[in-house]
C-alpha cells in the first residue's frame, strides 16, 4: 500500500497497467488495493482511458524531508520513525524500547486507527491529513517535575506553526491549540514509571494539516486545519520538522527550569484570560472568571468564594 500511495501521491493519473507494472502485481490485485485506498477515506478519481488519481494529491511522510528541516543541534539528538498505520503513536513510541541517554524519540504515522484524547476520548487522524506525532522523553526527576508540561507543549506547537505562517493561534488550558475558537491541535501526555524518580513521558500531538469538509464536520466539536488557517497548503513534513525543533528545545528548557520559564509566553496566547468560563469535572462544575495560570500551570479561577487553583487531569474548560 505504501508503494501504491507513493505512486499516486503526485495527484496525476496512473493507468491500472502502469501501477501493476511498478508494483509487480496483476490488474486484479491493483484494483483490490485501490479499493483499500478508498477505504482509508482518500478520494480516488477513476477516469476511463486515463486511469486513477488521488484528487488533490497527498504529501506522504518522509524522514529525510523531516530531517532537512531540523536545526543542526537537534539533528544529533532526535531519533525519527515514520510508519504507514498504527493504533496509536503514543503506544508505538514506547513499543520500540528504551532510547539512549540524551536522545528523544519521535514517531509519526500516516494514520492512527485508535488515536486517543484525554479520558478515553477518540482522536481522529484520517490518512495523510494530520501530523500525528509522539515523543518519548526520559525524565529522572519524577512526576512532580512535570507540572505544566502539557501547557508548555501547546506553546511549542504554536511556535512551530507560527514559523510556517500560522497567525492568531490561541491556547486553551490545559493544552489545546485553537484558531477562531476551533480546535487545530490536541495534546495527550502519558507518564509511565516511578512517580518519584525515573519515568518515561510520552507526548502525543495531533495537528490537523488538511482535512475535507466532511472529515472536519464529523469531529464532535468545531475543528479546523492548517490549510484553512494559513489559506495555503502547508507541508506535513515541514510541520513535523519544525515541531521536532521546538519540542526538543522546549524539553531541554523545561528539564532545567520547569513551567515557570514558559508561563509568561503561555499567558500571551491564553484563549480565555479575563473571560467567564466553566470548569467541568465528572460530578460537578464551577463557573468563574479566568485569571490565567500559576507557576505550576494550574488554572486560576475567580469565583464568588475567592480565587481557586485547578490542575489538569479530570477537568475540562468551557466558555460560559
Ligand atoms: P478538554 O477540554 O477536556 O481537553 P476536549 O473535548 O478537547 O476537551 P480532548 O481529550 O483534548 O478533549 O480531545 C478529544 C476530543 O477532541 C474529541 O472528543 C473530539 O471532540 C475532538 N477531536 C477528535 N479528533 C479531532 C481532530 N482531528 N481535530 C480536532 N478535534 C478533534
Image: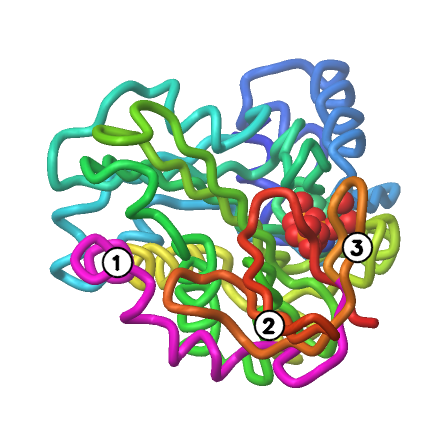
The percent position of residue 259, horizontal first and vertical second, equals 33, 63
Rounded to the nearest whole Å, what is the CA distance between mark 1 and mark 2? 27 Å
Q: Main secondary structure of the magenta part?
A: helix
- Kindly indicate the quadrant of the structure image that contains residue 184: bottom right
Q: Which residues are magenta?
A: 249-278
The percent position of residue 254, horizontal first and vertical second, equals 26, 58
Q: Counting residues from the N terminus, which is met first, the one under dot 1 or under dot 2?
A: 1
User: Is the shortest distance between ligand 1 and the CB of mark 1 under 8 Å?
Assistant: no
Q: Counting residues from the N terminus, which is met first, the one under dot 1 or under dot 3?
A: 1
The percent position of residue 124, horizontal first and vertical second, equals 71, 42
- Kindly indicate the quadrant of the structure image that contains residue 242: bottom left
The percent position of residue 74, horizontal first and vertical second, equals 18, 56
The N terminus sits in image quarter: top right
How packed is label 1: few (under 14 Cα within 10 Å), some, or many (20 or more)? many
Q: What residue sits right under mark 2 in the picture?
A: 307
Please name the residue shown 33% across and 39% down the image.
143
- Which label belongs to residue 245? none
Residue 134 shown left or right of residue 198 in the figure:
right
Please name the residue shown 75% across and 25% down the image.
36
**Disc nearest the viewer among 1 and 3:** 3
Q: What residue sits right under mark 3 in the picture?
A: 285
Q: What residue sits right under mark 1 in the picture?
A: 254
Q: Are marks 1 and 3 in contact (CB under 8 Å)?
A: no
The C terminus sits in image quarter: bottom right
How packed is label 2: few (under 14 Cα within 10 Å), some, or many (20 or more)? some
Rounded to the nearest whole Å, what is the CA distance between mark 1 and mark 3? 31 Å
Amino acid at each position: 500500500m505504501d508503494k501504491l500511495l507513493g505512486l499516486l501521491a503526485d495527484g496525476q493519473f496512473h493507468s491500472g497497467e502502469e501501477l501493476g507494472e511498478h508494483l509487480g502485481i496483476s490488474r486484479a490485485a491493483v484494483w483490490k488495493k485501490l479499493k483499500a485506498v478508498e477505504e482509508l477515506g482518500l478520494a480516488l478519481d477513476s477516469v476511463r482511458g486515463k486511469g486513477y488519481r488521488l484528487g488533490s494529491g497527498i504529501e506522504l511522510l518522509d524522514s529525510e524531508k523531516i530531517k532537512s528541516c531540523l536545526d543542526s543541534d537537534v539533528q544529533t539528538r532526535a531519533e525519527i520513525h515514520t510508519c504507514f498505520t498504527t493504533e496509536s503513536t503514543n503506544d508505538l513510541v514506547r513499543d520500540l524500547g528504551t532510547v539512549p541517554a540524551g536522545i528523544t524519540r519521535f514517531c509519526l504515522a500516516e494514520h492512527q486507527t485508535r488515536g486517543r484524547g484525554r479520558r478515553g476520548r477518540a482522536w481522529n487522524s484520517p490518512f495523510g491529513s494530520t501530523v500525528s506525532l509522539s515523543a518519548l522523553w526520559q525524565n529522572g526527576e519524577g512526576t512532580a517535575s512535570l507540572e505544566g508540561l502539557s501547557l508548555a507543549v501547546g506553546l511549542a506547537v504554536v511556535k512551530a506553526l507560527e514559523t510556517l505562517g500560522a497567525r492568531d493561534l490561541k491556547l486553551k488550558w490545559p493544552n489545546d491549540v485553537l484558531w477562531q475558537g476551533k480546535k487545530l491541535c490536541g495534546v495527550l501526555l502519558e507518564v509511565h514509571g516511578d512517580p518519584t524518580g525515573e519515568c518515561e513521558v510520552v507526548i502525543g500531538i495531533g495537528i490537523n494539516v488538511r482535512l475535507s469538509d466532511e472529515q472536519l464536520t464529523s469531529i464532535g466539536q468545531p475543528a479546523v486545519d492548517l490549510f484553512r488557517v494559513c489559506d495555503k497548503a502547508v507541508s506535513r513534513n515541514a510541520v513535523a520538522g519544525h515541531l521536532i525543533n521546538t519540542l526538543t528545545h522546549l524539553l531541554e528548557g523545561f528539564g532545567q527550569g520547569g513551567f515557570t520559564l514558559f508561563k509568561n509566553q503561555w499567558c500571551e496566547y491564553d484563549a480565555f484570560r479575563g473571560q467567564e468560563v466553566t470548569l467541568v469535572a465528572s460530578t460537578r462544575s464551577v463557573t468563574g472568571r479566568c485569571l490565567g495560570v500559576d507557576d505550576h500551570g494550574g488554572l486560576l479561577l475567580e469565583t464568588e468564594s475567592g480565587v481557586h487553583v485547578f490542575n489538569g487531569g479530570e477537568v475540562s474548560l468551557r466558555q460560559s
